[in-house]
Amino acid sequence: MPKPQMLLSLRYTSVVSLFGLLFALNSCKHCLHFITGADTFFDRRGKAETLVLHLVDAAAQVVVSLYFGVFEELDLITRTVRVKNVGESTVRLCKCASLCLDFLHTDMDLITFNGHHLMERCLDRASLRSGVQSVGSTRGASSHQHNPFVILCGHQADEDSGLCYGAMLLYSGNFEAAVECSQYENTRMVMGIHPHHFCWTLPPNGEFTAPEAALVCSPTGFGDVSRQFHRAVREHLVRDPYQGKRHPVLINNWEATYFDFTADKLVSIAREAAPLGIELFVMDDGWFGKRDDDNSGLGDWFVNEKKLPGGLGALVPRVNELGLKFGIWVEPEMVSEDSGLYRAHPDWALRVPGRAPARGRGQLVLDFSRQDVRDHIYSQLKTVLDSAPIAYVKWDMNRSLTDVCRRPARLPPGRGVPPLCAGGVRIPGASAHRLPGAAHRGVLRGRRAVRRRYAVLHAPDLVQRRFRRHRPPAHPVRHVLLLPSGNHGRPCVRRPQ
C-alpha cells in the first residue's frame, strides 16, 4: 500500500526514517513572522497575527513549528514550517512541504495552471479521483509548464458562485502541489518544495524553514479568490516604489535589433518613442562581453565598448536627455562556454563529473550555491549599475537547471536545487539598494526593493484572462509584440480590434 502524502520526512539514523510528532505547546503573536532570505507576505498596517504550533518528536529529537499568519481583513492565511534539530546527532530532512490541508470529502474539482513558452498558465480543471493528482516542476524553476498555484472547488463553482480554496506557494524553485483522495473519501492537499533532489542536513541546533504558502477561501467563486489574492499581493507582498501609482510605460529594443545594435541605433529608437508617451527605455541582451549571438558572452558582465563607445556613462545621459529613464537586461545565473568567465572558471558551471554538460539556449548554469560565484557576479553587476543612473533591471532566466549533482564539499548543509535557488535570492537581497526595479522572466528571485514581475509576451486581454487569477493586473510587465518574429513564425499576440 503506498504511503499517503506527507508534510515532512526525515532520517535520523542510518536506517530509521519514521516520524512521530506530538503537540507540545502553542503561542500567538500580534505580528507577522518573517523568513530570512525568502519572499514572504509582510504586514503593512500592523494588524496581522501569527499562531505557532510546536510539535515534538522525542525519538528523533526534532521540534517542528507550524506558523499560521492571519490577515483577517484579507481573509488570507499564510503558512510555513520550521524544523529544528534539538538533539546531538545529525538529522537529514528528506521532505519539508509548506502546506498540508485536509478535507473530509472528495467531491471537488482540482484546477491547475499549465502550459508552455508563450502559452503559460492555461486553466486545466478535472474532478478528483482516488489516488494522487499532482503538478510540479523539477526544472529548478516553477517553469512555464506548471504554476505553483492551485484551486480546489465544488463541481458547479464558477466566476461568481461556489466554494473555492486557493493555494499559492511563494517559491521559484522545484515545487510540488499534490492532492490525494484516500479510501476513506478524505482529501489531502500538500504543497511545497519538490522532494526530488532535496536532502537538507540538520546538524545539532540546525534548522530549516520551508517557503511560505498562502491560502484564501471564498464561497462566491473564482472572482473573489482572485480579488483576495490581488489585494494581498499588491499591498503585502510586492515591495514596489510605484505602490499605488501608475507604472511607467516602457519600450524594449529586443525585437527591433536583437544583438545587432549600436549606441546611435538605441538612441534613435528612444527618440522615436519619446513623443509617444514612452517613459522608460530598456536595453536588452547584447550589450556586454563578446555577445553577438546567444552562444557567447554570458558571464562577462562588462560593457562591450565596440557597440557602446564610452560605456553606459556615455549612453544613458543621451537617453535621459530625451525624457526617458534607462533600464538594462541581465541574466546573472547563466554562463556561455565561449566567455572569459568560463575559460577562467569552468568548474563554476553545473555539470555531472565525467559527463558532457546539458546545454539549453547554448548556455550553462552557474553554481550559485557557491559564495565565490555569487561574489564575482555581484561585483560585476555592481560595477555596471554604479556606472550610470540605471532606473530598471530586467532579470532574465532563459533555461532550466540541469546537471545538479551532489557535491558535499560545496553544498553544506543542504544539497540539490534549494541551495542554488537560495543563492539566486541572495544577490538581489544584497544589492537591493542598487536595484530599484527588476523584471524577472520565468523565475522570481528578488526581495525588498527588487520588484517582483513577470514579463509576458501576450496582449493585455490575454494577460487579464490567464494571468489575473492570483496576481493583480498590474503585476506582470506586458511586453506586447505586433510581429511573429522570434516566435518560430507563430503570432505572439492578436492585434487589438
Image (cartoon, rainbow, N blue to C red):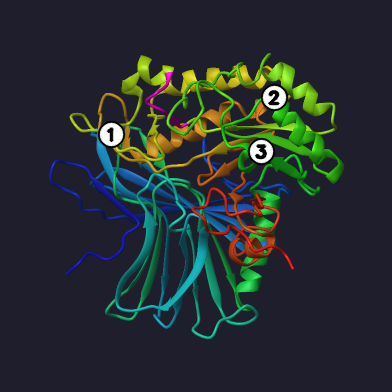
Compute the Cα span from label 1 to label 2: 36 Å
As helix, strand or loop, the secondary structure at mark 3 comes to loop
Q: Nearer the viewer, residue 417 or 354?
A: 354
Label 3 or label 1, whichever comes before in sequence order: 3
In this view of the protein, can residue 451 be seen by the observer? Answer: no
Decide: is 299 above or below 155: above
Q: Which residue is mark 2?
A: 263
Decide: is 11 above or below 377: below
Compute the Cα span from label 3 to label 1: 32 Å
As helix, strand or loop, the secondary structure at mark 1 comes to loop
Check the picture and name the quadrant holding the C terminus: bottom right
Point out residue 424 in the picture as x, y percentages from the top left corner: 48, 34
Q: Which quarter of the picture shows residue 108?
A: bottom left
Point out residue 89 in the picture as x, y percentages from the top left corner: 23, 34
Compute the Cα span from label 2 to label 3: 12 Å
Q: Nearer the viewer, residue 65 or 71?
A: 71
Query: The magenta stretch spans which residues?
Result: 333-339
